[in-house]
Image (spheres, rainbow, N blue to C red):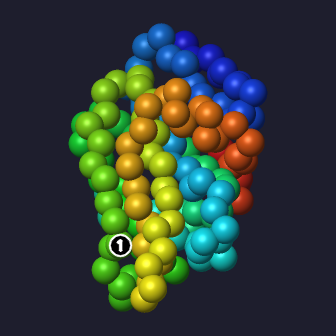
């Protein structure tokens, strides 16, 4: 049996009493630097979404190790810019924060796993990225 919890942040999280479905939330903190670039996000090398500035996406995953990676624009010609591996347990929720780091020559996306408390504060006013609206 599953129930839906809706927080003041507007995103929902599934609470499960049984089952092995888990979620990885990937979100991009609103930043002026690099705001126009959409970063393609991959789950285990499968493209899932071009994540916009100040938006989040929810990935449904099974228990085990998963790799979240990203690259600018999403073209398969370019190598992956960044990645993080997450060991997922049954029924858990995990959070990956994305921040654009700017240098003189280029911008890159930094991805780090964060705690639920940190994610809730940062995701408070975010909405689901448009690329996932029709998937839920």
- Residue under the image location 54 percent in, 36 percent down: 119
Q: Is residue 43 visible?
A: no
Which residue occupies the foreground of this view, 88 or 122?
A: 122
Q: Give residue 10's position: percent from left, percent from top.
A: 74, 35
Which residue occupies the foreground of this view, 7 or 88?
A: 7
What secondary structure is marked by label 1? loop
Q: Which residue is mark 1?
A: 81
Image quadrant where one finds the N terminus: top right
Which residue occupies the foreground of this view, 65 or 123?
A: 123
In the depicted structure, whether residue 76 falls above or below residue 90: below
* Category of crowding for the residue at label 1, using alpha-carbon neighbours closer than 10 angstroms: few (below 14), some (14–19), many (at least 20): some
The quarter of the picture where residue 109 lies is bottom left
In the depicted structure, whether residue 52 falls above or below residue 7: below
Image quadrant where one finds the C terminus: top right
Q: Give residue 16's position: percent from left, percent from top.
A: 50, 17
- Residue under the image location 52 percent in, 27 percent down: 117
Q: Is residue 111 visible?
A: yes
Left or right position of 90 against 109: left
């Amino acid at each position: 049996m599953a129930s839906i919890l809706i927080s003041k942040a507007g995103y929902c999280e599934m609470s499960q009493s049984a089952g092995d479905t888990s979620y990885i939330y990937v979100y991009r903190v609103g930043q002026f630097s690099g705001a126009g670039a959409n970063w393609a996000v991959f789950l285990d090398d499968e493209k899932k979404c071009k994540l916009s500035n100040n938006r989040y996406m929810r990935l449904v995953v099974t228990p085990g190790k998963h790799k979240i990676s990203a690259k600018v624009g999403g073209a398969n010609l370019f190598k992956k810019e960044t990645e993080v591996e997450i060991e997922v347990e049954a029924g858990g929720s995990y959070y990956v924060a994305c921040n654009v780091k700017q240098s003189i020559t280029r911008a890159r996306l930094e991805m780090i796993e964060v705690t639920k408390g940190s994610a809730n504060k940062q995701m408070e006013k975010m909405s689901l990225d448009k690329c996932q609206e029709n998937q839920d």
